[in-house]
Amino acid sequence: MKQSVLLSISGKDRAGIVRDVSEALLHVKANIEDSSMTVLRGRFTMMMIVEMAQKDGLGALKATLSELEQRTGLTVQSQILADTEAEHIPQEPDCVITVNGADKPGIVFAVTDAMATLGVSIVDVSTRSRASGSGYLYMMALEAVAGDALAKLKTKLKKVSLDLAVSIEVHELDDDVM
């Protein structure tokens, strides 16, 4: 019987982290099914779902992850997924929303509030703030599932764009391209 486990891994960024983690998982025959990794201000963070061949392999996984923490200085958290979670088929995004403008508090809230009130689901989000001239430039990209609310979302985000004085664009994803 198979078991899926969610892993959250973080630590100071350096070359070789993905190799070290994947090697440890290979040692216990854990298959990496889904993963997302990024570096935030010199801190590496990764989330992944791995599948173990047998539920009794969880002890070996925990021991391997503990050894990985000791050897590398990474922090690893694990959470066993229920069968219904492991079998969940994620929604595919049908649009990408980009936000650019002067950095200020409230951008993420205003954009995501507009999305949530329409029932638009966020699949992935990435943000960056960079020094630019006399201030900071803020950039955000969101992959989302808007479905039938796409036209309303575009209208609502135009108002948010004006209120915040930032540029917001909604890009529809073409099924033929995906």
Image (cartoon, rainbow, N blue to C red):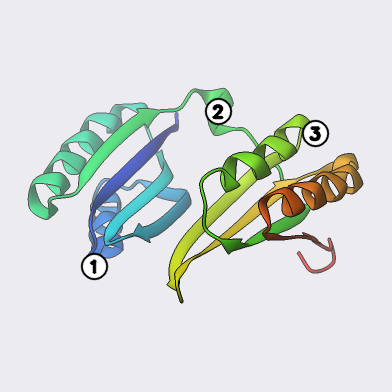
Q: Disc 1 versus disc 2: distance between alpha carbons?
A: 30 Å
Q: Position of residue 125 (x, y in %)?
A: 57, 51
Sooner in the amino-acid sequence: mark 3 or mark 1: 1
Dot 3 falls on a residue whose secondary structure is loop
Q: Residue at x 64, y 53 (%)?
A: 142
Of the pair 89 and 149, the residue shown nearer to us: 149
In the rendered view, tell whether residue 6 sits above or below residue 153. Answer: above
Look at mark 3 in the image and give the residue it sits on.
118
Q: Most extreme residue toward the bottom, as rendered?
A: 133
Judge whether residue 32 can be spotted in this image.
yes
Dot 1 falls on a residue whose secondary structure is loop
Dot 2 falls on a residue whose secondary structure is helix
Q: Amino acid at mark 3?
A: Leu
Q: Position of residue 76 (x, y in %)?
A: 25, 41
Q: Disc 3 versus disc 1: distance between alpha carbons?
A: 42 Å
Q: Residue at x 84, y 51 (%)?
A: 154
Q: Position of residue 178 (x, y in %)?
A: 76, 64
Q: Position of residue 151 (x, y in %)?
A: 91, 48
In the rendered view, tell whether residue 36 sits above or below residue 102. Answer: above
Q: Disc 3 versus disc 2: distance between alpha carbons?
A: 25 Å
Look at mark 1 in the image and give the residue it sits on.
16
Look at mark 2 in the image and give the residue it sits on.
85
In the rendered view, tell whether residue 80 sits above or below residue 176. Answer: above
